[in-house]
Image (tube, rainbow, N blue to C red):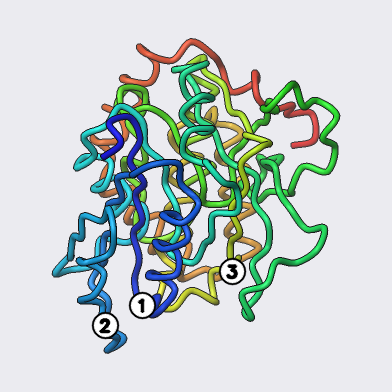
Amino acid sequence: MNTELTVIIPFKNEGEEVGKTIRSLNDMACGNINIIVINDASDDGYDYSSIASEKNVKYIIHKESLGPAQSRAHGVKLCETEYFLLLDAHMRALTKGWNKLIIEELKTDKRAVFCCKTERLLDNDKISDGEFGLGVNLNFEDLSYNWIQDHSSIQGTIMSIPCVMGASYCTNKRYWNKIRGLEGLRSYGYEEQLLSIKTMLEGGNCYAITNVSFAHKFRTFKEVPYKASTVDYVFNQLYIIELFYPVKLKTKIFKKIKSEGDDNTFEIALNNLSKIKNEIISLKEYYKANFSRELEYITDFTNL
């Protein structure tokens, strides 16, 4: 087994996609790899028992669903290697020796989060010509994003970016624990935004690895193969803003989010946020003590 990198793949109701993803990783890897696959309480009736016998796989089953974010966090906790790669269960490795190339980059900066080049995987398992992503720019009004179109800042095999994206992001376990990973997120949504903002505020860097590609079946919130909570989705959005935005700006953006969405959903999410007031205070104190940058480092507030 590879002693440096573990792939972590949580899933719920992905059917045959899980096996296809695993076999793709093994086929394109250089040597043996470690793969932790987490079945997050799938309820689609598909027989996933064969996953346990897939090459290089450690198979975990959740009796109750934790959601994607906390399933990833569980995988990181189980990880016994220094480095790890987080993937979705509907992806394909496109680069031969992807694992060795990723490890090489991870060793260059241990205060960083990396993502790989992402290409669009179509429903017929073909790759869409000319469509690829190398990180995103964030809209700090609502944490939405746009794929970076200008790739002129590529230096060798990496490109400095403000936010990882594409469900192929990786780092080392020590750094993940320092920035406290995806702690606090519920169900689905805003994982890459939280991780990237914390990385930049800590004093670290976000990079896209340009010579490693994964194909990904991109899905919107409404297209995931399970019932995702709209309340939790909005909660995650509010949670990140509450943690890191100054009060005046936070208040303005909360009003904007409420006005553009469903009032009832917003109020429930806001109430859920108020229930963890003490936890948020504790986290803010931790981040203040351990992070070296202000939010202004990664965004210009002149348009807010």
> Left or right: where does residue 216 sit relative to residue 156?
left
Around disc 3, counting alpha carbons within 10 Å, would you say few (fewer than 14), some (14 to 19), or many (20 or more)?
Answer: few
Judge whether 298 appears above or below 250 on screen.
Answer: above
The residue singled out by tag 3 in the image is 220
Label 2 and label 1: CA atoms lie apart by: 7 Å
| Whole-percent x, y for residue 9 in the image | 36, 56
Q: Which of marks 3 and 2 is in front?
A: 2
Where does label 2 land, which residue?
43
Disc 1 is placed on an element classified as loop
Q: State if disc 1 and disc 3 touch (CB < 8 Å).
A: no
Of marks 3 and 2, which one's residue comes earlier in the chain?
A: 2
- Closer to us: mark 3 or mark 1? 1
* Residue at the extreme front: 31
Question: Relative to 123, does residue 86 appear above or below in the rendering?
Answer: above
The residue drawn where x is 52% and y is 16% is 108
- The residue identified by callout 1 is 13
Kind of residue at badge 3: Thr
Against 59, is 220 above or below? below
Q: Amino acid type of disc 1?
A: Asn
Q: Are marks 2 and 1 in contact (CB under 8 Å)?
A: yes
Circle 2 residues within 10 Å: few <14, some 14–19, many ≥20: few
* Lower sequence index among marks 2 and 1: 1
Q: At 34% from the left edge and 44% from the top edge, which residue is drawn?
A: 33
